[in-house]
Image (tube, coloured by chain):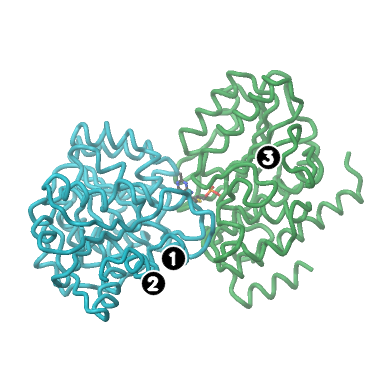
Amino acid sequence: MRKAFINSLTTISENDNRVMLLTGDLGFSVFENYREKFLDRFINMGVAEINMTGVAAGLAMSGKVPFIYSIIPFVTMRNYEQIRNDLCYQDVNVKIVGVGAGFSYGPYGHTHHGLEDIAILRVLPNITIFSPSDSVEVGFCMKKAMEIDGPVYIRLSRAEEKSLYENDGELMVGKGSVLKKGNDVVIFSTGALVHTALAVSGELAKKGIEATIVSVHTLKPFHIETAETLIKEKKYVITIEEHSVIGGLGSIIAEVIADAGLSVPLVRIGVPDRFTKEIGNQDHMRDVNGLSVDRIMRRIEELGLFT
Amino acid sequence: MIKEVELNDLETHAKNIRREILTMSYNAQSAHTGGALSCVEILVALYFKILQIDPLKPLDADRDRLIFSKAHDAKALYAVLAEKGFFAKGLLEGYEKTGGKLPGHSTRNCVPGVEVSAGSLGHGLSMAAGVAYAGKMDNKSYKTFAVLSDGECDEGSTWEAALWSGHHKLENLTAVVDYNKLQGFGLTKDVLDLEPFADKWTAFGWCVEEVDGHNMEDLVSLFSSTPFKSDKPSIIIAHTIKGKGGIPKYENEMSSQYYPPTKEEFEEIMENLR
Ligand SMILES: Cc1ncc(C[n+]2csc(CCOP(=O)(O)OP(=O)(O)O)c2C)c(N)n1
């Protein structure tokens, strides 16, 4: 998704000279062309994410539209109070771009995993949170980020996922997009795991269970009525996310169900509340955390939801 | 003065460690090789001449501590610990491998001898300062060493730790900066110039020495003379070369941070490092 991001940012920067790219010393083999093309609008801020965030606030207060970029923990956690006070409290026009959603940096260790970002950013007023699942959604989120005059967070995976759409014509901020319709169960997913959710729906279909699949590209704002309509009449609701099971998409859906007084069983599939001891590539890390198609199917079967 | 035979031993360790680093890099097709190669002599001097440690008692309460803050270069630390006998060299095969024991960033007690989990830059000096402070509180004689990268001297947290350690006169703390002049996406002088680097540390209450970070003899003699002053933390600015002793074309190149050696390069360098 990094390629889709930088391509989209390049186009946006050609048309709007307020746009800037600030990076926390990352971007080798991805940002060289951008740097060459927009020499005075590209700043390598060094390994100094806190300063990068505050400087971006000042630039935004003075008419610029800075995008700040690093790996998820460094651009959402290291600088969290700067995001809260300098960006959200003052509602300034800074776009945060975090790369490495979930276990993208599998064998690197937990310092590089992006597993709590949604939970901690979602509680901040004024922020918009995008979590695209393919390059079309990335382009859409970038376009919408430019239309929003305030802080936006875009959560990117590291791999290049295959495209789910021909174009972004049907996408709407705040409303998950329905990729597939089925009457028995609705599965909400976000980011790269939307592809896993689609595979799960294929497995469920073999068992005669028809699933609606929703790609939740916008986690905040979250259009409650849209989700409610999708949930009503279904026997079960499942959420699948590469994020802690606490505070992310599963929690959002639980809140919707509770607030609307719906009575439908909810299965939240996410990363358990522990640091993973094992190391391995992204697929392995997903598997040992119950996020592979196999493990998800086993979980659903164990719960006896469809017997 | 260090004896010639001893010096030869240290150079042999350094060569072995470079072989292991390059092998891990090649086998795991990993990034972060240039910065591992630049700190080999620093780690060899510390682990084989300076640190009071016993590989058989890795958690001994009186051991000297080495806090490896530039943890993305963990290959260097793992190779040195294995060479020193903290764990079997065979475990190095599990570096960044599914089911292996060695994560890309050194993680506390993933194998014996790794003191802290790091990987997010700019955390190590604060932890080292805490370890040193506790040592003084408890009247322990252990020394604490922190190995930092130049890139992480961009972080405000590094300078908070510097200020605090100077203020509290932590003479039992020594930091070493692997000053290879390259960081993640550019030259240090272009990204965020650290110069005048030594003056900054002096102003923060540290006693500073500079050294050729690949000269084993000078490193050993400097480390042996810490603390440089009885009432100040010590810092050694080690001038190094990113990618040193690896593939020639990686020396002083940013690509050494990202690309593992190709098959041909790997075979050739292993031949040369015999
Ligand atoms: C807080 C934080 N920001 C960004 C990174 C990503 N990163 C890993 S290594 C590196 C820079 C490498 O240069 P340097 O720190 O000088 O290390 P060395 O050259 O000694 O390997 C960066 C930006 C990180 N690990 N931690």
Label 2 close to label 1 by CB (< 8 Å):
yes
- Residue at x 61%, y 57% (from the top left corner): B102
Callouts 2 and 1 in the same chain: yes
Query: Where's residue A282, x and y in %?
Result: 44, 64
The residue that mark 2 highlights is A294
Q: Are marks 3 and 2 in contact (CB under 8 Å)?
A: no
In the displayed structure, would residue B226 be above or below residue B274? Answer: above
Residue at the (65%, 72%) spot, across then down: B266
Report crowding for label 1: few under 14, some 14 to 19, many 20 or more residues within 10 A (C-alpha): some
Amino acid under disc 3: Leu
The residue furthest front is A307
Image position, residue A18 (x, y; %): 19, 47
Residue shown at 43% from the left, 44% from the top: A46
**Distance from Cα at disc 3 to Cα at disc 2:** 43 Å
Which residue is denoted by mark 3 in the rendering? B66
Evaluate if marks 1 and 3 touch, with contact meaning CB atoms under 8 Å apart.
no
Q: Chain A shown in which color? A: cyan
Q: Secondary structure at mark 3?
A: strand
Determine which residue is flagged by label 1.
A287
Mark 2 and mark 1: span between their CA atoms? Answer: 8 Å
Which chain letter goes with mark 3?
A: B
Disc 1 with disc 3 on a shared chain: no
